[in-house]
Image: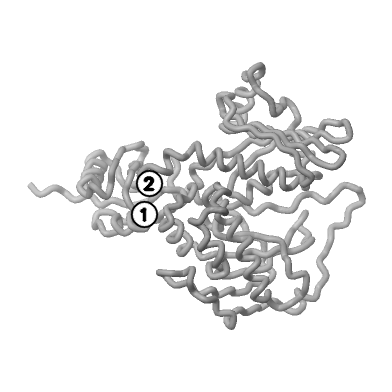
Amino acid sequence: MRTFKQLLLSTIFILPSVISAHSAHAEVGSQTPHSTVPNTSLITSNRSANVASSALQTPISESNLPAPPPEVTPITEINLYQVELADISNSNSVALNETQLVQLSEAGMKKLLVRLTGKSVLLDSPRTEFLLSNARNWLRTYSYVPIVQEGVQVGQKLRLKFDEVAIKAALAQAQIKIWPLNLRPELLLMGTLVENSSVTKLDQETLQYRIDINLRYLFADMALRVQTPQSSTPWIYPMNPANNIGALQDLLVQSDLDKLLSYKLVKRDDSYELSWYLFSENGSVLAKGKAENASRSQLMDDMVALVMARLVELNREVLEINDQVIINLTNVSDLKSIQQAMAVLQGNMPTLTELNLVAVQDRLAQLQIAFRGDYASLMQWLSAMPQFSVVRSSEMLRQIDANFTYVEPVE
C-alpha cells in the first residue's frame, strides 16, 4: 500500500536540458481567462546566439540501420499540462511570431484536451469551443528542447506549457471530467507487420529500428503507459480468441498487466490496412477495429483515439459518480485515533457522501471518501479542520496525505 509520496517518487523523471525558454505571457484572468487579449509585447526570448546558429549534431553509424528511437519523456502529473510539438519555425529566429504562436497553441490545446479526457470527440463539441478558439490565451510559456538519440542531439522540438489552474477550472465549469492518471491501465502492445510477403513481430528489439510504427510514442504522449514484449514468443494476433483464450490469459497474468492491444498492419501497394483487438485480462474482447487508408500515421492515430475512448468508457461509472479520493492518515497508531478521525469527517456530511476505512498498516490508515463539489473545495474544507493537517495532495492521483491530531474526549 503506497502513499501519494511513494507514488510520486515512483514516477519521477529527468527532463532533457532546455535549449532556450520563452514566455508566452498570455495573461489569464481568474474569472474569464478565455476572453483576455494576449499581450504580445511581453513575448521575449533568451535564446543564445551560439545555440541559434550552431548546426545540430547527427549520430554517426557504420551500419545502414536507422538510429535508435529518441528518448521518451513520460507524462506524469508534474508535466501533464506540457505538450511537445514539432518545431515549425524552420529558422534561427529569436522568438516565434504571434501567428506561429496562435497556430501552435491550437494544435497543442487539441492534443492536451484528448490527453486530459481521453475523448477525441470533444474536439468537435461546443463545450470545448471556447478553449480551442482562444487557445493562445491559455498558453503560459514555450521552450525549445532537444531531440536526443543515444545521447546525441539530432534536432529540437517545442514544449508548450498551458495554464493548469485555469484549464482545470474551465473544464469543471463545462462539466468535462478529467481522466485521472490512477485510473488509466498499463497496456501490453503486440504488433504484427505484414509487408513484402513477410510477417514481422514487433517486439522490443524490432521496434528499436522501426520508429515509424512504434506506438509507444503515441500512447506516451496521451499519458498511457505501455509495454512491448521482449521476445516474439508467445504471440497473440488480432483475432477472436475463442480457440486460444488460455494462452491470452496466461500471457496477461505473466506480464502483470490487465489489458492487451494486439494489432496487425498490412502494407499494400498504395495503402495500409490496420486491424486490432483490445483484450481484457479474462480474454474477453473490449473493442476491435479494422480500417484502410493511404496514410499509415492516420490509421495509427485513429486506433489510439478509439482505444482511449473505450478505456475511458470502462471508467465511466467511476467518473460520473461523486468524486472519490483516498485520504492517507500517515501518523495514526491506534484504533481510537482512526475512529475519531472518521467521526470528525462524518460530522461534516453532506459534503461527504460516503466514507470507508479501506486499510490499516503500521502507522498508516487509508480512508476512501466520496464528496460533492470540486477538488479545490474539498481541499479548502479539509484544511479548515483543526485536527487535520494536509501534508501533500494530488488531484490526478486522487490521494491526500494528512496528519491527524487526536484530542482526548472531555469527561
Determine contact: label 2, label 1, CB under 8 Å.
yes
Disc 2 crowd, CA 10 A, few/some/many (<14, 14-19, 20+): some
Q: Residue furthest top?
A: 243
User: Viewed as shown, does residue 165 lie left or right of 189?
Assistant: left
| Amino acid residing under circle 1 | Asp
Q: What element carries label 2?
A: strand
**Residue 105 screen position, x and y as percent:** 61, 65
Vertical comparison of 381 with 256: above or below:
below
User: Viewed as shown, does residue 227 lie left or right of 28?
Assistant: right
Disc 1 crowd, CA 10 A, few/some/many (<14, 14-19, 20+): few
- Say which of 15 and 40 sits in front: 40
Q: Answer whether residue 229 is visible to the viewer in this image.
A: no
Q: Report the residue marked by disc 1.
A: 374
Q: Answer whether residue 195 is visible to the viewer in this image.
A: yes
Q: Which of marks 2 and 1 is nearer the N terminus?
A: 2
Here the colouring is: one colour
Q: Give the label on residue 13, or none.
A: none
Q: Report the residue marked by disc 2.
A: 323
**Residue 405 screen position, x and y as percent:** 25, 52
| Amino acid residing under circle 2 | Asp
Q: Quadrant of residue 102?
A: bottom right
Q: Residue furthest left?
A: 411
The CA span between labels 2 and 1 is 8 Å
**Residue 129 screen position, x and y as percent:** 52, 60
- Say which of 367 and 380 sits in front: 380
**Residue 381 screen position, x and y as percent:** 29, 56
Q: In which quarter of the image is residue 198?
A: top right
User: Viewed as shown, does residue 152 lie left or right of 162?
Assistant: right
Give the residue drawn at x 88%, y 57%: 60
Q: What element carries label 1?
A: loop
